Image (cartoon, rainbow, N blue to C red):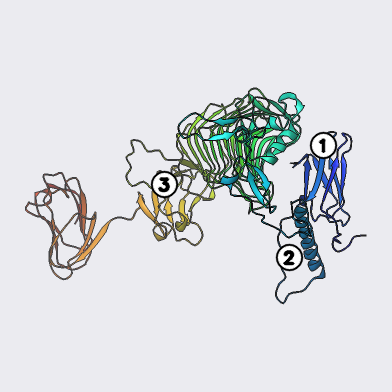
Amino acid sequence: MTTEHIKMPAVTPVVRYTANGAQTVFAYPFPIFASEDLAVFLDGAGQVSGFAITGAGNTAGGNVTFDAAPASGVTVTLERVLPIERVTDFLEGGDFSAQSINNELDYLVAAIQQVERDNDTALQYGDHETPGMTQLPDKAVRLNKALGFDGNGDPVAVSLAGSMAPPDFTATGTGAATRTSSDKFSDLISVKDFGAVGDGLADDTLAIQQALAAHDTVFIPNGTYLITNTISLAAKQALIGAGQKAVIKCQADTFNAIELPEGFCTIQNLRIESGDIAIKLFGDTAECVQNSVSDVQIIGAKTGIQLDGYTDTNKPCYWNNFARILIEQPITHGVHLTKSGAGDTPNANRFHAVRVYSKGAATTGSGFYIEHGSLNNAFVDCEANVNGPTADSCFRLGAGSSKTMLVNLLTESSNLVPNVKLDTGSVETSIINLSAQSDGAAIDDSSSGNYDAYNAGSPEKNTLRKTVISDLKATLMRFDTEFIDVAGTTAIDLSHSVHIVNATNGAITIELPLASTAAGAEITVKKVDNTSNIVTVSENGAGPGPDGKDLQLGGANDYATIISNGSAWYIKSSNRLSGNTRFFDGTGTYDIDMAVDIYLVSSFGGALTTRLPPANAVQAVGRTVTIKKTDNSVNAVTVSEQGGSGPDQANQSLASQYSAITVVSDGGQWFIVSKNL
């Protein structure tokens, strides 16, 4: 029968067993609220995998079932470990749930039991003795001494002189201090100090776990250390090897070799063989930040390094650093950034000189796969050389990737494997100096161009999105061109600058995007067929069109270049522009300034002289101009020349309405091209 809450019994929340080498199921006779509340230890070393916990929420407790029986003689400890915190918050004026208060009280009782158990293991004065001083002597006083008790029974530092002790150690050099050998040896703890063998045959898992349980910095000497379960580092711990002959070898590929569920850890100077994931970083018990992995070789793991955003946004996977790492023969991915739960994406991590090399192995994924990641995950001087027949890509940016930086990347494969693959949804990728040696696409882009490339890609080495240039010198300009020949309406975007339109199959309407979405954009539309089908240039939606109205291109090779200022489209140039004309109504002398091609003049108020500039004037040479009388009065319009004799060496008179003359200058005199008097 299921109860509403745990009935918290009076029980110490820890139990210990001595393994017999065959037993796999061990009971814990106290309640836990969730499986993560139970800590599992083998000879004092915390375990993170290789077992299953059942019975969470039951008053009577439950069981821990190991995948493989612990070795005979190993002490199995099962302990309830709870964070000391409130788990329920009761709202002022809200409903008061009996179940909520029962759960809160159960949790508080469990926490008190945990504190009581911790106190039970501490040295303490007897109930019938008046407590004395409990503070240890100062550190400087107790250095290299034993703990003793004075005449009052209080702790004092006792000299080791006269007792059997190892010889002292003194470093060479001025200022060196004498230390005991025991103190000196404690500077760096080796896994061999905890019984590790390093012959590749003995199971050294527990020895490594125990060393890390007791010390923050652990040394791996040369040797091959076989492990059958995951090695997990707590915050600020370091696992340092003697070099690439210091090998941690997984017995199988069903578990992760090393996990970093917290931050500020260091892994360096060692080699890892096999395993599901060789090194996994994820924020589980705390933020997974500022970890450092360097000078590591990884061989034969399914995935070399994985960064997982995991399940809690308050425990992110940020700011981790990787340098000088070789990942050989990965089965799935070399480096994988992902998010397996509701946590944040791995962000702002740094990879320098990380190389992935299939070395003939059948890698099925990618050398680097940034499935999820944001805010400047940077890969500098990295290399991906993957097996051509099976690999997906050398470097892949997934749909959850954003603002990823690739600098000085070398990629190599065969069988048309893409060098860099950009999935739909990937945004703001930056690629600088790509040496693409695979025969696949240099940049296989499904992101709709949402990337920037400098000295990367093929055949175009540079791909830039929105760019501001204050001063540009271009020796050759190229424009991306689109050909349109489908009758009806075609809505164009800003992906091409020039649109060649053939209306042979019927009239075509070219619909510009709204000017408000295209500030600064320039588009050219040209009709190339000689049919009578019209090409109309309009604007999407409520936009009025170029120069405030639709533009029609009716003749072969009619064109228009249109530019947006962010509020409207304007015609920049076209052979379909309206003629340049000026109208003047007056008497006396009116100087023709050559600013327009046609002057419509009226002499209705009296005789009018229109005076051309000198034929050799800069604004006149090679120019043609037309002058036409528009009024029906008897007042004549005289066409003369300033300082010269006039068109065809004489003043010309426009005496009647609609009389007109067209003249041109050769730089020496004005000539009449046509005249209608």
- SS under mark 1: loop
Q: Amino acid at mark 3?
A: Thr
Q: Amino acid at mark 1?
A: Val
Among all residues in the image, which is located at the extreme bottom? 93
Residue 335 point in image, percent of width and height: 62, 36
Among all residues in the image, which is located at the extreme right? 1
Q: Earlier in the sequence, mark 1 or mark 3?
A: 1
Q: CA distance from mark 1 to mark 3?
A: 66 Å
User: How many callouts does the rendering have?
Assistant: 3
Label drawn at residue 378: none
> Mark 3 highlights which residue?
467
Identify which residue is drawn at 21% across, 63% down: 657
Q: Earlier in the sequence, mark 2 or mark 1?
A: 1
Q: In this rendering, is residue 610 above or below 234? A: below
**In-image side of 359 versus 90 (left or right):** left
Front residue of this view, candidates 111 and 481: 111
Rendered-image quadrant of the C terminus: bottom left
Q: Earlier in the sequence, mark 3 or mark 2?
A: 2
- Neighbour class for label 2 at 10 Å: few (<14), some, many (≥20)? few
Dividing the picture into quadrants, the one containing residue 217 is top right
- SS under mark 3: loop
Task: Please identify, in this view, whether the residue under mark 3 or under mark 2 is nearer the observer.
Answer: 2
Identify which residue is drawn at 73% across, 74% down: 94
Residue 103 point in image, percent of width and height: 80, 64
**In-image side of 277 versus 396 (left or right):** right
Dividing the picture into quadrants, the one containing residue 582 is bottom left
Task: Please identify, in this view, whether the residue under mark 1 or under mark 3 is nearer the observer.
Answer: 1
The reply to whether discs 1 and 3 touch (Cβ–Cβ < 8 Å) is no
Q: In this rendering, is residue 439 above or below 451? A: above
> Mark 1 highlights which residue?
74
> Mark 2 highlights which residue?
88
